[in-house]
Amino acid sequence: MGRWEPNTRERLVRAAVELFAEQGYDMTTVNEIAERAGTTKTTFFRHFPDKREALFAGQDTHSRLLADAVAAAPDTATPLDAVGVALDALTAAFPPERRAFAARLRVVIAGNDELRERAAFKRAGLAVALTDALQQRGVPDPTADLAAELGVLAFYRAFDRWVDPADDPATDQTFTDLARQALRELRAALPEL
């Protein structure tokens, strides 16, 4: 595959996940990722600062989706309603055909301390994006922080359910449905605190 082929960034991400799953994160080089993706090491570094970041390529996009959706929520929306709108927007970016890839990515991240640490940083970044967007709507602290944290918790609970290989794909709910369910469950648990 030539360097001019489309979707270079996507190919690099997929190659990285495949290689990390096959031979481990520590044993995989940037050269191998670039070669598997049909490009060069130089091209890899045009897209990512290091091999770890290839796995977290969508963080800025995800944060933007959340913030834009909170801003677009109806004026009458409560903070958690606005978070629900944001979760709908974010989960819509994960089509069903990405489920198997997402499951593989989760396994790769779970198997490496450095990647788990980076995943925690991403999770915190999503909460900050939601908090900032809620504050721009006039939601005060600590309400904005709490609503954002609940939203991120709902997202990750839904993500874990969505990619769980034990789930039967024939009866599978969409990621959006799972996120809505997770947010409802968390809201219902609040009075018990």
Image (tube, rainbow, N blue to C red):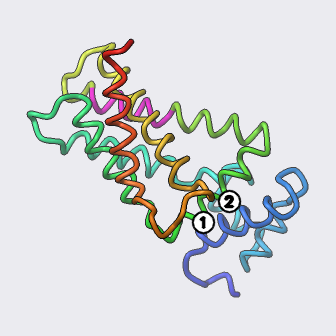
| Magenta stretch secondary structure, dominant | helix
Give the magenta-colored segment's residue range: 125-134
Percent coordinates x, y for residue 143 in the rendering:
29, 17
Name the one closer to the observer, 171 or 158. 171
Circles 2 and 1: CB distance less than 8 Å? yes
Residue at screen point 75% across, 67% down: 18
Identify the residue under disc 1. Answer: 100
Name the one closer to the observer, 179 or 173. 173
| Looking at the image, residue 38 lies above or below residue 48 | below
**Circle 1 SS class:** helix
Left or right of 44 in this view: 178: left
Residue at screen point 63% across, 40% down: 119
Q: What is the quadrant of the C terminus in the image? A: top left
Q: How many numbered discs?
A: 2
- Which residue is most to the left? 76
Identify the residue under disc 2. Answer: 104
Residue at screen point 26% across, 31% down: 80
